[in-house]
Image: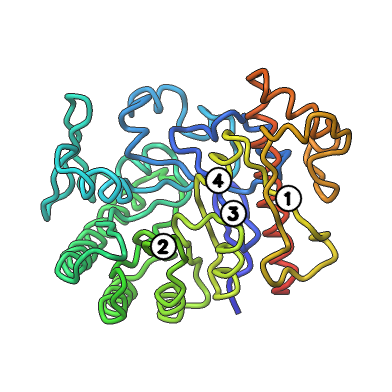
Amino acid sequence: MALTELTTANGTVQLPAFVPDGTRGVVRTLDANDLRAAKVQQVQMNVYHLMQSPGTTTIQALGGLHKMSGWDGPISTDSGGFQVYSLIRQNAKFGSLTDQGAIFRIEGRKFKLTPEKSIQLQLAYGANVAFCLDDCTHVSDSLAEQRKSVNRSIAWAKRCRKEFDRLQSQKNAKPAKLYAVVQGGNSSELRTECAEALKEIGFEGYGYGGWPLDDDGNLVSEMLQLTRDLLPDDLPLHALGVGHPANVTAATRMGYTLFDSVMPTRDARHGRLYTFTVDPNETHLTGKDWFKYIYLTDKKHLKTATPISEYCDCPVCQTYSLGYVHHLFKIKDALAPRFATLHNLRFMTQLMENLRREQR
């Protein structure tokens, strides 16, 4: 049976849960009250972006991530490992990798991120859950590259564990948790080797690492299931970067408990909304037709007087019509992306409520 709760110094998260990405200290277009209205429980931020802007001294001067953002619930922080994949592994001009860490070169500036520095920054910012710096890959990368990634990620995890424990032992340290990330691409042998090594080190939770989709955009279900089976049932297991509603549902049924992705909020800002085709409070979600997309720019919504979704209790659906939200997008009013993001996040939290009921 998968874990049902995650307790942190800033509150308890009911699992499974979707964690929206507030990469630079904000879930774009929303404030903390909007997040609460959407029934978000936890937010994920990113140390790579935060160390650049607003920067460590500014974050500390503003009281840490919680006080700065006005969000008093749990915050997890990505280590910067994903940017190893999305930047350095995609284009050498953005930096380089060594066994010591990653060196990023962005707009004429150089940023060095070691396992120790990543942990130092995450804890200095006040994260409730920190992630080990890892060497993230794509599932189609060569076996040789996957081997390097696994060896590096294990070595970095040991260094992260040591630095995390050192900082947590200091007087007045805020209690936090450290998750390690399982790499290995599409190799069951490497995934197993990485998971076993990380379990031997010991962490408070684990993440599925690497790009979670294949070259055709399909969820790498076999590797997700294998990784899930290798890890303890009584600890949180975070499917990093999984955010499509169907993929979240599938991975939850495998036993994953946490998900983060920019997809629902990015889709919202571009006018693609998620809606249930059945009542999520009454229905077991099976097959492929339990949700659909609404494209706000479609002219057919111009005079629609009903809400975006009859099954949604978000502030937008409770107050405004789909036709009005279409109008806001058409005139490019600032309310439009805010309303759309509020709705999509409430869809995701409703989805997780449904999946929690299914598992109880």
Where residue 22 appears, x then y in whole percent?
Answer: 50, 38
Residue 339 vertical placement versus 255 (above, below): above
Say whether residue 305 is left or right of residue 330. Answer: right
- Mark 1 nearby-residue class (10 Å; few <14, some 14–19, many ≥20): many
- Mark 3 nearby-residue class (10 Å; few <14, some 14–19, many ≥20): many
Please give the name of the residue rendered at 34% of the width and 75% of the height, measured from the top-left corner: 199
Looking at marks 2 and 3 on the same chain, the residue that comes earlier in the sequence is marked by 3
Question: Marks 2 and 3: CB-CB under 8 Å?
Answer: no
Where residue 281 appears, x then y in whole percent?
Answer: 83, 61
Q: Amino acid at mark 2?
A: Asp
Question: Marks 4 and 1: CB-CB under 8 Å?
Answer: no
Please identify, in this view, whether the residue under mark 2 or under mark 3 is nearer the observer. 2
Q: Amino acid at mark 4?
A: Pro
Residue on which disc 3 sits: 18
Q: Secondary structure at mark 2?
A: loop
Q: Amino acid at mark 1?
A: Thr
Please identify, in this view, whether the residue under mark 4 or under mark 1 is nearer the observer. 1
Residue lying at the far front in this picture: please name it: 299
Where residue 38 appears, x then y in whole percent?
Answer: 71, 42
Looking at marks 2 and 4 on the same chain, the residue that comes earlier in the sequence is marked by 4
Inter-mark Cα distance, 2 to 3: 24 Å
Residue on which disc 1 sits: 275
Question: Marks 4 and 3: CB-CB under 8 Å?
Answer: yes
Query: Can you tell which mark lies on residue 216?
Result: 2
Please give the name of the residue rendered at 58% of the width and 47% of the height, measured from the top-left corner: 42
Inter-mark Cα distance, 3 to 1: 16 Å
Residue on which disc 4 sits: 20
